[in-house]
């Protein structure tokens, strides 16, 4: 009886593993155009402007803007598959040369099928790299669990106030 149970359990394990196939992760796709870029991977997508406006020059202004439920003019938009969210990022460059990244998060409201404002905050502030003119910053983001994303952000003018930046993405899957 015991042998029959062990043999039956072994047969079930073999049958269960027969249908399991290794699924290769989908590749990361980077699309670069003259004015924008798009990076997709793990069901998520980041779209950004290569020459992005910097509408804010103080932390107070960017913090107030992203906390409002109305959408901001985003330089980057991250669309997440799980949980279903749209995250808009905006730039601010302070007089001291800090790149402040503000974000607005919208989450899918399943009954209405609409993305609704859930939060707005300052994601992070980045100091400029030393001895670089115009100012240059390295911004780290995550596109997915296994996809690290780095943005090189460079001011388009050598002095403050900075009104636009050039963004160059690179991905490490």
Image (cartoon, helix red, strand yellow):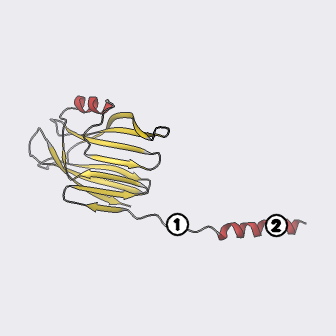
Q: Position of residue 18 (x, y in %)?
A: 66, 71
Q: Earlier in the sequence, mark 2 or mark 1?
A: 2
Q: Nearer the viewer, residue 164 or 33?
A: 33
Residue at image point 27% right, 52% down: 151
Residue at image point 25% right, 33% down: 62
| C-alpha gap between disc 2 and disc 1 | 30 Å
Residue at image point 43% right, 57% down: 42
Q: In which image quadrant can residue 117 be found?
A: top left
Q: Residues within 10 Å of mark 2 (few under 14, many from 20)?
A: few
Q: Position of residue 32 (x, y in %)?
A: 25, 61
Q: So how many labels did they put on this image?
A: 2
Q: Is residue 7 above or below residue 127?
A: below
Q: Name the quarter where the N terminus is drawn.
A: bottom right
Find out whether the residues at labels 2 and 1 contact each other: C-beta distance under 8 Å.
no
Image position of 106 (left or right of 139): right
Res. 19 visible in picture: yes
Q: Position of residue 24 (x, y in %)?
A: 49, 67
Q: In which image quadrant can residue 27 be found?
A: bottom left
Q: Which circle marks residue 23 in the picture? A: 1
Q: Position of residue 58 (x, y in %)?
A: 20, 32
Residue at image point 17% right, 40% down: 97
The residue wearing badge 2 is 6
Res. 99 visible in picture: no
* Label 2 vs label 1, nearer the camera: 1
Image position of 67 (left or right of 115): left
| Residue extending farthest front | 112
Dot 2: what SS?
Answer: helix
Dot 1: what SS?
Answer: loop
């Amino acid at each position: 009886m015991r042998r029959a149970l062990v043999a039956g359990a072994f047969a079930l394990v073999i049958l269960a593993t027969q249908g399991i196939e290794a699924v290769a992760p989908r590749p990361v796709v980077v699309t670069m155009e003259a004015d924008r870029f798009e990076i997709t991977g793990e069901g998520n997508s980041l779209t950004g402007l290569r020459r992005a406006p910097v509408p804010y020059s103080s932390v107070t202004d960017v913090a107030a803007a992203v906390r409002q439920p109305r959408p901001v003019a985003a330089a980057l938009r991250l669309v997440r598959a799980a949980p279903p969210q749209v995250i808009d990022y905006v730039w601010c460059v302070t007089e001291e040369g800090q790149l402040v990244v503000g974000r607005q998060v919208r989450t899918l409201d399943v009954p209405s099928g609409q993305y609704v404002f859930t939060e707005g905050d300052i994601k992070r502030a980045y100091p400029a790299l030393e001895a670089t003119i115009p100012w240059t910053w390295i911004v780290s983001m995550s596109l997915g669990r296994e996809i690290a994303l780095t943005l090189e952000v460079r001011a388009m003018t050598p002095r403050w106030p900075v009104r636009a930046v050039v963004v160059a993405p690179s991905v490490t899957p």
